[in-house]
Image (cartoon, grey):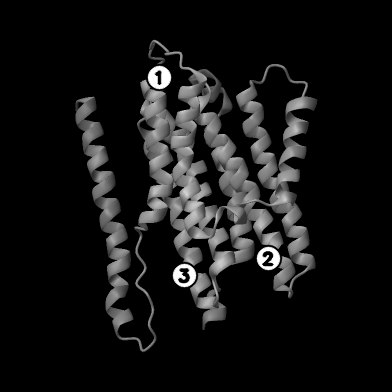
Amino acid sequence: MHKNVKTTLGIFLFFFFGFIALWDISASRADYIKTLDDAIPLFSYFKPELFALVFVPLLVATGWRVWSGDSHWSSAWFYAGVPLGLIASSISLIGVLQLADSLDQTRYLVGESLLAIFYGGSASLFGYLNQCKMNIKRERKIHSNIAKLFVFILSTLPLMVGMHNYTGLFAFYDFSTVFIFVAIASAFLLINRDESKSICLLICEAMVMISLASVLIALVSYNFYQGYPTLTGPSIAIGILGPLYGSFTIFVCIIFFPETDLRETNFGRINWHLLEISGLWILMCFAPRSMLEMF
């Protein structure tokens, strides 16, 4: 079978059966929900605001890298999908901490926030499957700092708007998390003696460690102050904001570093670690009830 035919067929089957699966999961519960006395919202796998938070910056970053002659579009999707999913999910989770006023509402909003990770993971998967393994020689265009600044603003503006709409920009600034960020970033960039590593690789490894350190520090405080929501709230926020800061920095690296540096960084491993760290914290703080608890 011709390669283009196989690719087209694979894309069609991916979206067709994926859509059918998600529709069936949602529709199969609709009839039962209508029979209940309590008003329970029907869960949908499409959340427009979270979808936009992932794919608008992704498309801007992809357009820049392809137009500048630096990358195939699939590489940008593979590298940036998971970090953007974690950023969007973290924005939504901070909104949960600030705005949720009941247990049921918190449960619904946490479930919705995880959709962003699903969107980002799907984008990374789609990029990985279409990744061009050949080193295609392109003329790399040199751009001014003003052009790069414009692309940075254009790609991050949707994230800033999302932060503002969910709970306000100031909710995403925390002194403790910033100090953790600066401490570990300084250690990686100034103390590290392995000169064989590129700056891009060092930054991305530092961001993974910042995410892990934030979660571990938050975990100690969270366990110590259990039972006091006023004290545990800031701890939960640190565990969310650390991976948010780290994922955002990685996304900026993906936009501007050359393809050779990005390939050396091994984003399959970086994204895997980011998912592990964020998943640990989400399940620690927002775990659903078990079957025994429900029945």
Q: Tell which tag, 3 or 1, sits nearer the viewer.
A: 1
> In the structure shown, which secondary structural element does the residue marked by tag 3 occupy?
helix
The residue to which callout 3 is attached is 108
Percent position of residue 96, x then y: 54, 65
Percent position of residue 231, x then y: 74, 68
Q: Residue at x 68, y 35 (%)?
A: 206
Q: Are marks 3 and 1 in contact (CB under 8 Å)?
A: no
> In the structure shown, which secondary structural element does the residue marked by tag 2 occupy?
helix
Percent position of residue 69, x then y: 39, 17
Q: Check the image and report above or below for 215 versus 283.
A: above
The residue to which callout 1 is attached is 68
The residue to which callout 2 is attached is 233
Sequence-wise first label, 2 or 3: 3
Q: Residue at x 45, y 40 (%)?
A: 81
Asked whether, in this view, residue 151 is left or right of residue 176, the answer is left
Q: Tell which tag, 2 or 3, sits nearer the viewer.
A: 2
Sequence-wise first label, 3 or 1: 1
Crowding at dot 3, Cα within 10 Å, few <14 / some 14-19 / many 20+, comes out as some
Spatial separation of the CA atoms under disc 1 and disc 2: 43 Å
Whether residue 248 is visible, yes or no, is: yes
Q: Residue at x 26, y 38 (%)?
A: 10
Crowding at dot 1, Cα within 10 Å, few <14 / some 14-19 / many 20+, comes out as some
Which residue lies most toward the front here?
146
Asked whether, in this view, residue 242 is left or right of residue 112, the answer is right
Asked whether, in this view, residue 72 is left or right of residue 14, the answer is right
Amino acid marked by disc 2: Gly
Amino acid marked by disc 1: Ser
Nearer to me, 8 or 93: 93
